[in-house]
Amino acid sequence: MSASKGKKGGSAAGGSGGGRQGNSSGTKPPPLGRRVTATPLSLSLAVNAHAIRKQFSDSADLRLRMTASPAAPGIRLAVLYLQGIVDENNIRENILDKLQSASAIEVAPRGSKAGDICSRLRSEVITSGLTESVTTLERALDALLLGCCLVLIDGSGEVLAAEASGGSVRAIAEPTSQTVIRGPQQGFTESLSTSIGQIRRIIRSEQLIVETQRIGRQTCTEVSLIYMKGTARPEMVDEARRRLSEIDVDGIVDSGYIEEYIQDKTFTFFPTLISSERPDQAAAYLLEGHFAIIVDGSPFALLAPVTFFRFFQSPEDYYQRFDIASFLRIIRMSAFLITLHLPAIYIAITTFHQEMMPTNLLISLSAQREGVPFPALVEALIMELTFEVLREAGVRMPKVIGPAISIVGALVIGTATVQAGLVSAAMVIIVAFTAISSFVAPQMNIANAARLMRFLFMISAGMFGFFGIISIDLILIIHLAGLHSFGVPYLSPMAPWIKGSWRDTILRMPRWSMKLRPAIAQDGNRKRQASGQPEDQQKVDQQLKGQKP
C-alpha cells in the first residue's frame, strides 16, 4: 500500500489507541488518560476538590455539590461536574437521587472502609451508564472534560467517574450542501454518537466496525474510523489508522483539520477525500469497501479512498432510473469541462484564432469589443474576480439579504460595466454561464478546484492561445495520473483500466448488472448480490420461450 505523506506529526496523541465503539459489550468506558504525568489523589475529599478546582482556576461552570448517602454512613461525598457538557437531569436522577435514597439492602454497615464504599457505590447504587474508578488527578480532569460526573469520597484515594455527557445539541435536519429530490432527507450532526447511530440504522450488521481515538492535546477530540470488516482492505484500514495516530496537534475542531493531515498529497488542486454530510452516502461507500472518518463536533464525514469520477456522482443517482442518472453524470462532467475551458477558449479565439469563428459571429463580437479598452484576458480576469467577490459576499451576508445582494449586485454591475464600455456583453454571458456550470458538481471541493484552475487556463490562453490550453490539459492529465488516494490510483478504473468497473463511473448501468463491488477498495468479498436478479430472470424467460413448440 503506497502512502506518500509529506506532513506527519510525531508521537500519537489522544491517549486511547483505537478502542472499538459500537461493538463493545458496554462493560468498559473509553480510556480517559491523555496526560503523561500521574499525580495520585489524596485521601481527603477537601484536598481533591481543591486540587481539581485549582486546575480549572475556579471556573464558573465547574459545579461542586456536597451530599451524603445511607450507602456510606458517616462519610462525606461530593459530586463534581462541568455545566454545559453534561446532562444535569441524568446526574440528578441517576447519581444524586440514587445516593440519597439508597435502599436498605444497599446501606453499608458502619465502619466499612472507604475503598469498599467506592466499589459498593459503583456496583449497586449509581446507575448512570458506564462508571470507572479513577486514582490520579490527571485522569479525573480528563473525565470531567469528557462529560463525566465525578463522585468524590472522603477517606478514599479513588474517584468514581460516571458517564453523564449531554447538553444541548443540534437536532437531525436536512443536509444543507448536498440536497436531493428523492432519497433520505437527513444529515449528520455535530454529535459523534448520533452520527454513528445514523450509519448503524442503515447498516445493521456486526461487520460494521467503529474504532475511536482522541486527537488533540487541548481539545481531546474523539475521532472515529468506520469500516466494514471483511469488505475493506485490511492494509488500507491499517494505513488510515496509522495516519490518524500520527497526528499530534493542540486541537482538532472540524474534519477539515483531519483531511489536511491524512491526505496523500498536499500541493494539488484536487481533493483526495470526499466530505459528506449524508449518512446514506457514507453507508453506501462503506458497503463498497471504503472507510469513513467522523469527527466529534463536525457534521461532515470524510470518505476514502476516492477517485476522480466519484466527485461527479450524487447519492440521488442510485435512487432513480439508471438512464436518467447516466445522463446527469454526463451533464456534470460536461459542466466541469465548461467551467475550466469556456473563458479560456473565448480568450484564445478572440486574441489569436479569429479565423475559427463564423464571419457573422466574428463581426458581432468585433462590434461589441470596439469600445472596450482592455484585451480579452484582462476583461475576463476583471469579470471573473468580480463574480468571485460577489459570490463570497453572498455567502457571508445574512441569509435574509444574502441572495438579494448577490443578484442585485450581479445585475447592476453587469449592466453598468457593459454600458460603460469596460467589458463586452459576450464576456458577461461567458462568465455567467461559467459560473452556473461551476455549481453543477455535487461535491463543492471539486468545484472549488475548477474555480482555481480556471484562472490558470485563462492566463495560458491569453499568452499562447489554444497551444497554451492544450499544454495545461496535458499537464493536468499527467498530474491526475500521478495522484493516489490511500494507494488507489486517482483515475482508476480508467487508468489503470479495471475490467468490469466501468459500469458505475461515467455511466451508471442497471443495479442488477453491477454484481461485484469495485475492485479498487475492497478485498475478498466482491460479490454483493445473489443470483436470481432481473438479468437471470430474463435468461430463464428466453429459455422457456425457446422450448415452446
Image: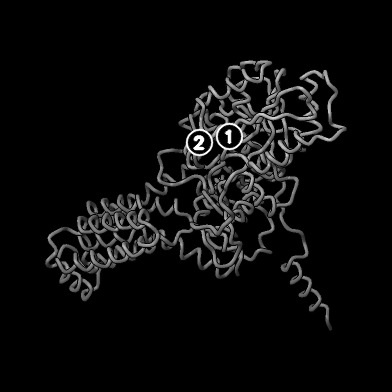
Determine whether 141 is above or below 508 in the image: above
Q: Residue 434: name its quadrant.
A: bottom left
Determine crowd level at label 1: few under 14, some 14-19, many 20+ residues with C-alpha closer than 10 A: many
Disc 2 marks a residue whose amino acid type is: Ile
Quarter in which the C terminus is drawn = bottom right
* Residue at the front extreme, as displayed: 74
Q: Is residue 61 left or right of residue 42?
A: left
Q: Please tell me how crowded label 2 is: few (under 14), some (14-19), or many (20+) other residues with Cα within 10 Å.
A: many
Q: Quadrant of residue 321?
A: bottom right
What distance separates the C-alpha of mark 2 from that of mark 1? 21 Å
Question: In the depicted view, which residue is nearer to us: 163 or 207?
Answer: 163
Image x and y of residue 360, in percent? 21, 76
Residue sitting at x 58%, y 29%: 14
Is 315 on the left-hand or right-hand side of 118?
Answer: left
186 vs 134: above or below: below
Q: Quadrant for the N terminus, please.
A: top right
Q: What residue do we see at 46% from left, 31% from top? A: 6
Answer with left or right where residue 489 lies relative to residue 546: left
Q: Is residue 243 visible?
A: no
Question: Where 363 falls versus 155 (above or below)?
Answer: below
- Residue 236, percent from left and from top: 61, 38
Left/right of residue 515 with respect to residue 247 in the rendered view: right
Looking at the picture, which amino acid does disc 1 mark?
A: Leu
Indicate the secondary structure of the residue bearing disc 2.
loop
Q: Mark 2 = which residue?
A: 252
Tell me the mark number nearer the camera, choosing from 2 and 1.
1
Which residue is pictured at 56% across the width and 57% down the height?
173
The residue under label 1 is 82
Circle number at residue 483: none
Q: Across the whole image, how many numbered discs are drawn on residues?
A: 2
Q: Earlier in the sequence, mark 2 or mark 1?
A: 1
